Amino acid sequence: MGAPLRRRDTGPALHERAAADLQYIRGTMERAAEFSAVPGRGGMAMGGVALLGAAAAQAVLRAGRGDGAWLVVWVATATVAAGIGAVALTRKAARLSAPLSRGAGRRFLFCLCPSLVAGALLTAALARAGAYDVLPGMWLLCYGAGVTAAGAFSPPVIPATGGAFVALGAAALVALPGVPAARLFGDVAMAAGFGGLHLVSGALVARRHGG
Amino acid sequence: MRADEFDPLFLSQVRLGIVAVLLQRGAATFPELKDLLGVTQGNLGIHLRKLEEGGYVAVEKEFVDRRPRTTARLTRAGRDAFRRHVERLSRLGD
C-alpha cells in the first residue's frame, strides 16, 4: 500500500499522491467487483440433498427398478438442490445488496447457466440413447465448467471447487462407461462431487464470506 | 489546491479502500473487507469506526449461528463525500 495523501502535501507531491490514491481506489474497486453472494450454507444444504440422492439412486438400482427410475431420482434431487441454491443465492444477494440483475451478479449467472442448460439437454439425449453410464461424469463436468466460469467473478474457493468438479467429472467419464460396477461408482462420484465438494466449499464460503 | 482542502476522513488509504469496496458492493462483511484490503483486524476496526463516526458508513452487528457478524454499508453522505473526493483527486492526479 503506498503513502496516502497527507495534509502537508503541496505542489508536485500533491499531484503524485493524488495519482497514487486514484490508482489505489481503482485497484480496490476492481478487486471488490467479484461476486461474493455465493451461498455457503445453501451450498452445504445442496450437498446434503445430493448425498441423500445418491443413497436413493443406489436403493432404486438395488431394488431392480431400472434406469428410468434411477434417472428420475437424480432429476428430482437436482431439482430440489437447484431450488435450494436459487433461494439461498437470492436471499444472500439481497442481504449483501449485490443484485443478480446487474454487475458481478449478472456475470455470475450468465457464466453459470449455459453449462447447466447444456447438461440438461445432454441428459435428455444420452438417456434416449440409453447411455446412462455416461451421465454422472457428464453432470459433474458440465456443472464444474459452469462453476469454474462463474468463479472468475467470485472468491477463489468457487473456481477451485469448479475445477475439482471438472476433474472428478473427467475421471468419471474416462473410467466408468462400460465397466461392470459403473452405476455404483457413478453414484459414488456424484456423492463425492455434488455431496462432498458442496459441503466443503459451502463451509469455507459460509465461514469466510458471510453465510 | 492544497491537501488540507480534502476531506480528512479520506486522508487514509484504508478508509479510501473501505469506501471504494462499499461503493462497488453496497455492503461488505468485516472479513471480506479485511481480505480485500489486506489489513489487520484492529486496523480495520479503527478506520471503520472513524467512518461510522463521520456518518459515512453504517455498521450493523448481528449474531448468525451464535457468531458475531459485522456488516458495513455506505451511507448517502459517504457516497456523496467519496464522489467529491475522487473528483478533486482526478483534477490533480490524472
Image (cartoon, coloured by chain):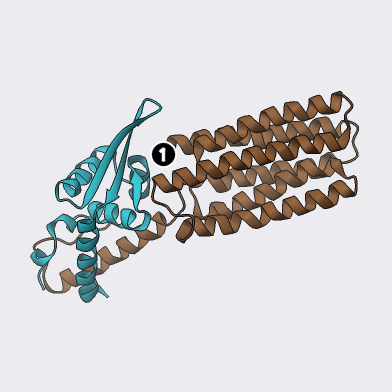
Chain colours: A brown, B cyan
Of the pair A101 and A159, the residue shown nearer to us: A101
Is residue A38 shown to the viewer in this render? no
Q: Position of residue A198 (x, y in %)?
A: 59, 36
Question: Is the N terminus of chain B in the top left, top right, bottom left or bottom right quadrant?
Answer: bottom left
Q: Residue at x 57, y 32 (%)?
A: A45
Please indicate whether residue A154 sits to the left or right of residue A51 in the image.
left
Please indicate whether residue B49 sits to the left or right of residue B62 in the image.
left
Q: Position of residue A165 (x, y in %)?
A: 66, 43
Is residue A40 shown to the viewer in this render? yes
Q: Chain of mark 1?
A: A
Question: Is the C terminus of chain B in the top left, top right, bottom left or bottom right quadrant?
Answer: bottom left
Secondary-structure class at tag 1: loop
**Above or below, comparing residue A52 to residue B31 in the picture:** above
Please indicate whether residue A151 sits to the left or right of residue A33 in the image.
right
Q: Position of residue A161 (x, y in %)?
A: 59, 43
Q: Residue at x 33, y 54 (%)?
A: B21
Of the pair A25 and B64, the residue shown nearer to us: B64
Q: Position of residue A38 (x, y in %)?
A: 50, 45
Of the pair B51 and B6, the residue shown nearer to us: B51
**Above or below, comparing residue A63 to residue A7 in the picture:** above
Please indicate whether residue B49 sits to the left or right of residue A95 in the image.
left
| Residue where numbered disc 1 is placed | A210
Q: Residue at x 28, y 66 (%)?
A: A22
Q: Amino acid at mark 1?
A: Gly
